[in-house]
Image: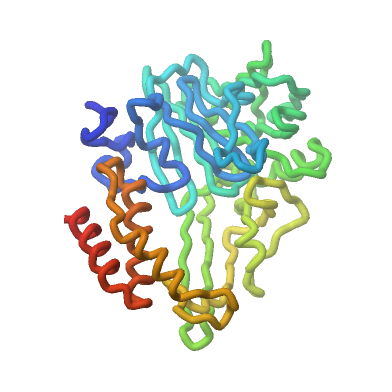
Amino acid sequence: MPRGTAFGTEAVPKVSSNLAGQPVPTNDWWSTLVWTTANSTPHGWPFYAYPMSFRSRPDGLAVELTVPTAGPRQYKQPMSEAFPIVVGVQGLGTSESLVHDFTDWTVTAAWFEGGHNFTATIGMGMPFVYFEKGSSETAVVKVNFGSQVTVNGNVILIENNMNGADYAVYGPAGSTWSGNGGEYTSTLNGKNYWSMALLPSGVAPATAAADWAQYAMVFPGNTEANYSYNPSTGEVTTDFLVTPDVKEGTNSTVLQGALPHQWGNLASSSAQPGTYTHPSVRGDIKFIAANSFSTSRTFYGILPTLPDVADYSDSFDRSELFSLIDGQKNSVLQAYTDSYNDGKLMNRLAQMVRIADQIGHTEARDQMLATMKARLE
């Protein structure tokens, strides 16, 4: 079945039978996994769950630390073509990956071709990536970038990988890893799960790897964000909940990552971050060892358009504003391209319609409204 590779053709989401017939979000941080376009690859483009970058490949999942762009005017988030670490199973070589499952802030990608069975679960802000395989598969970790690699029983410690990142790969209890030319394999002691963590900055990698081993086998079974609003106080409380899927061991706590807009607004009753952090292009990620945390913000309302008053600016000139709107009243919408760019153009007109109405420029208001209505029809 075609995947919607040509302009104007039906797009079929790249999902496994686990999601057959279900609606799938197409504007999330992982949405590149769900579509393929004519100028893309069957494995899509990089996607970002800070502080790490990811990309699907025929042989598995490429993992890399995301770092800020080189120049102040660059807007693309970087990911190299070196693929410094690739995790998969032995002999994997699929034509495409699929979305196998998703929750509020996790996604599970799957590589199922050729008798292989490999999945990777990734969560926004989470330092761990969680893997599962078929019972007869052999787990593989390829280190393609010069690093110091140490194998100690069921743990691979990868130091000074691309962009200075340190990682730990955790196999189940009793498992061992064998290395050959940068490729490390394990039968996982007959188990079908393992994980990998980007270790926190400012801490000796071996120390952090040993400390975080307690979380390595506690997978996120489900994630859910729920909010409540108190209209009398304007307080919005959001609870971030994780259902743990404990693969082995006695610990049942997931290690989560909070972004600045979350840890900067934690509720007083919420679980709090520990001392470990890692920088990201969105600010420091702080790690919380808890299956839930809560944020609290006061919502003051939003003005869709600034009022037509000069209270806050001595240079406000109503006639100049009228002239600017008048110069845009004949704006047209370009030939249809796609919903994203078309939406931006219509939003621009919608904002000017409000301003035109506010300043009494009814001719411009009605003309721009007619342009929008014609496109929507």
The one of 348 and 23 positioned closer to us in this rendering: 348
Check the image and report above or below for 292 versus 279: below
Q: Is residue 52 above or below residue 265?
A: above
User: In this picture, is 149 found above or below 31?
Assistant: above
| Residue 102 in view, yes or no | yes
Q: Quadrant of the N terminus?
A: top left
Q: Position of residue 301 (x, y in %)?
A: 48, 77
Q: Position of residue 68 (x, y in %)?
A: 66, 41
Q: Position of residue 180 (x, y in %)?
A: 67, 12
Image side of residue 183 versus residue 357, left or right? right
Q: What residue is rendered at 77% in x and 55% in y?
A: 275
Q: Residue furthest left?
A: 377
Residue shown at the point (62%, 54%) measured from the top left: 253
From the viewer's perspective, is 342 left or right of 152? Answer: left
Quadrant (top left/top right/bottom left/bottom right) for the C terminus: bottom left
Residue at the bottom extreme of this rendering? 232
Give me the residue at 67% from left, 52% from top: 283
Q: How many marks?
A: 0
Q: Place residue 321 in its image quadrant.
A: bottom left
The image quadrant that residue 130 belongs to is top right
296 vs 107, nearest the viewer: 296
What color scheme is it? Answer: rainbow
**Residue 13 in the image, given as x and y percentages of width and height:** 30, 37
Asked whether residue 197 is in view, the answer is no
Identify which residue, 342 or 369, lies in the foreground.
Answer: 369
Is 44 on the left-hand or right-hand side of 17?
A: right
